[in-house]
Image (cartoon, grey):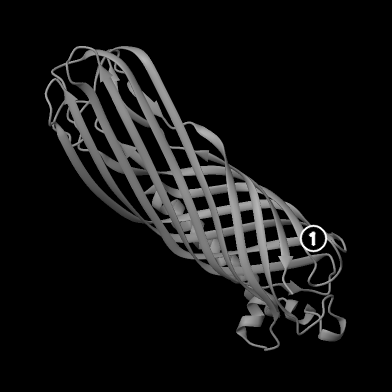
Amino acid sequence: MFKKSVFIATVGVACIGISSMSYAASFAGWDKMIMPPSTRRQPVNYRYPYIRVGVGGYYVRNPKVEIGTLSDTSPLATIGTSKLTPRFNLAVGYAFYNQNTSWVTKIFGHDNAVELKLDYLNSKEHKTNSNLGVGQVWFIDGSGTVTAGAQPLTSFKLDSSHRYINTGLYYKGKWITSNPKIDFLPRVGAVFTNLREKYDYSLVYQSFVLTTDVENYKITTDYYGLAAGGRLACNVKPRCAVFGDIEAQLLRASSSLKAYQNAAVGVPGNQRNVSYHHAKITYRAIAAVGGEYKLNNKITSPSVEIKGGIDRWGYDPHLVPPNNAGSRSVYVAGNAQNNLFADVEVTVPIG
């Protein structure tokens, strides 16, 4: 109940805050501060496509997965350390001056853009261990232990991967005020993220002719929903600005698990298959600070941007295999997760 209240409050505050900043322009007189074409800091009637490419580091806090138990009740195999992973960004857009006067320009100003963005990362982990001592594992369908009691173990191998593909289609704007130091850039959009997680595990026993337990898990999670955010920029120099950026996303997350086990320990044919599905409403919140440098004073100037921040997921899927007597079959749980990032991006207008 507490987590649900926090989620509702977070999304509510973000949406109200963004809407308030937009509509407050007219009530607070900001609409009168929008500079007329004759005195604007940028030329009117421009239209041009652009491309943005970037690379950075994303500090992924992978969920911890525990499989089996040793004689002292500690996990037999554990994987899920936090690590820095390369992330690659790409965006294509079309910027234009919107000459109309409507609710769109009251929210987004006259400097508008439509942008499609994509980013990708793949975090991998490999773990092995030998001389394990005595332990046991459970059937993934929760039907009991693979062996009758704990047995001497030789070694295990556990590989995992977490692949993120994020996409978003945004409508962006820019409020250019009579204050040459301050700009506000609101945006709204539709977003989609595909997260694919894989765990491949194998264990070798000492005491049997057939001695392996092999387990494979694949979790596919789709997030889709709406996003709203904005950037407050301070122009410290004609071609240099520092900024703070925030975005809130309201999402539906849908996770599907496919699990397979071949416990050929002592006798062949101990195979199990388990499927599981889970869906919920959740959120994502991204906050960043950074700086931007333009190569010249033209509206079509290339620019370089450096930023870093925090990326909070309200729901991050977590694999939970059966690890003790009375455990249910393997399933997917979800926890909130905070990841960190830093990116360098280059924007190049075309034409």
Tag 1's secondary structure? strand
Which residue is at the front of the view, 70 or 336?
70
For the C terminus, the quadrant is bottom right
Q: Nearer the viewer, residue 303 or 308?
A: 303
- Residue 262, position in %: x, y? 20, 32
Amino acid carrying label 1: it is Cys
- The residue pinned by badge 1 equals 234
Q: In the image, is 43 to the left or to the right of 147?
A: right
Residue sitting farthest toward the front: 209
| Depth order, front residue of 192/203 | 203
Residue placed at 45% from the left, 50% from the top?
Answer: 314
Examine the image and state in which quarter residue 346 appears.
bottom right
Image x and y of residue 304, in percent? 76, 56
Q: Position of residue 253 (x, y in %)?
A: 38, 56
Quadrant in the picture for residue 107: bottom right
Q: Residue at x 20, y 38 (%)?
A: 329
Q: Is residue 197 left or right of residue 323?
A: right
From the top left corner, tell me how far across and down residue 168 is, in percent.
53, 64
Asked if one can make out residue 323 in the rendered structure from this viewpoint, the answer is no
In the rendered view, tell whether residue 100 sits above or below residue 297: below
Q: Is residue 240 visible?
A: yes
The crowding category of the residue bearing disc 1, from other C-alpha atoms within 10 Å (few below 14, some 14 to 19, many at least 20), is some
- Determine the residue positioned at 12% across, 31% down: 269
Q: How many marks?
A: 1
Place residue 91 in its image quadrant.
bottom right
User: Residue at coordinates 26% horizontally, 51% vertically from top-left?
Assistant: 277
State whether residue 350 is above or below residue 322.
Answer: below
Q: Is residue 87 left or right of residue 50?
A: left
